[in-house]
Image (tube, rainbow, N blue to C red):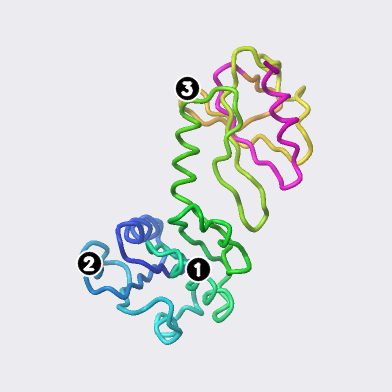
Amino acid sequence: MRVVIAGAGSVGRSIARELLSHDHEVTLIDKNASAMRVSQVPEAEWVLADACELPALEASEMEQADVVVGATGDDKVNLVFSLLGKTEFGVPRTVARVNNPKNEWMFDQSWGVDVAVSTPRIMTAMVEEAVAVGDLVRIFSFRQSRADLLELTLPADSRVAGTRLGRVVWPADVTLATIVRDGRPLVPSQDDTLEAGDELLLVAGAEADTEALQELLVPKG
């Protein structure tokens, strides 16, 4: 897979190293010469240019990219880069970093963004997940499908604690993806039994009734 990343700062370089470790091809673009720390990610291709200018993207052979990632610290740059990638170069998938939560509403398909990653929102979700038992926490939202990844730690007084999964009737458009028990992820099967303290990771579609899901898993009051 070929990936073009706008922004060669610490975030962009970290993404590049991770992708390269999985044998993907990576190009890093940044207009600041101070960001050209080629020795830190020598396996990547480096381009000193403005990621919002078409000639720079053409020089980076953006049309051959499978994914582009807007990873700069400037939301405007990430939006323009995603829009150009989608509309001018037909890139199949665009991922954009959201720096200011107030701008999150713009990071959608109208700006060519398939997946928006908001670090403040993810950090907030991680804090909530760490301290909350019995509350549904939205970990991540998939822009293209409008589905949500939800987490809930099952309390001891849950009505489904001790129940075999084959007997649990989930609300429509809700799927249990993983059970994390004692720090280990388990692939759920119909014969598994839910236990108090289980961390449930669920995928809920855009039309899913999350209130019904909360009521199923956690008793009122």
Q: Which residue is mark 2?
A: 37
**Which mark lies nearer to you, 1 or 3?**
1
> In which quadrant of the rendered view does residue 150 lie?
top right
Q: Earlier in the sequence, mark 1 or mark 2?
A: 2
**Which mark lies nearer to you, 2 or 3?**
2
Alpha carbon of mark 1 to alpha carbon of mark 2: how far? 24 Å
Q: Secondary structure at mark 3?
A: loop
Which of the pair 75/172 is nearer the observer? Answer: 75
**Residue 18: image x %, image y %?**
37, 55
**Residue 171: image x %, image y %?**
77, 34
User: Quick check: 72 left or right of 159?
Assistant: left
Quick one: quadrant of the C terminus? top right
Q: Which residue is mark 1?
A: 79
User: Quick check: 111 left or right of 125?
Assistant: right
State which region is magenta. 195-221
**Residue 155: image x %, image y %?**
59, 17
Residue shown at 71% from the left, 45% from the top: 205
Q: Is residue 185 above or below residue 12?
A: above
Q: Secondary structure at mark 2?
A: loop
Q: What's the residue type where badge 2 is placed?
A: Arg
Q: Secondary structure at mark 1?
A: helix
Residue shown at 31% from the left, 75% from the top: 31
Q: Residues within 10 Å of mark 3 (few under 14, many from 20)?
A: few
Q: What's the residue type where badge 1 is placed?
A: Leu
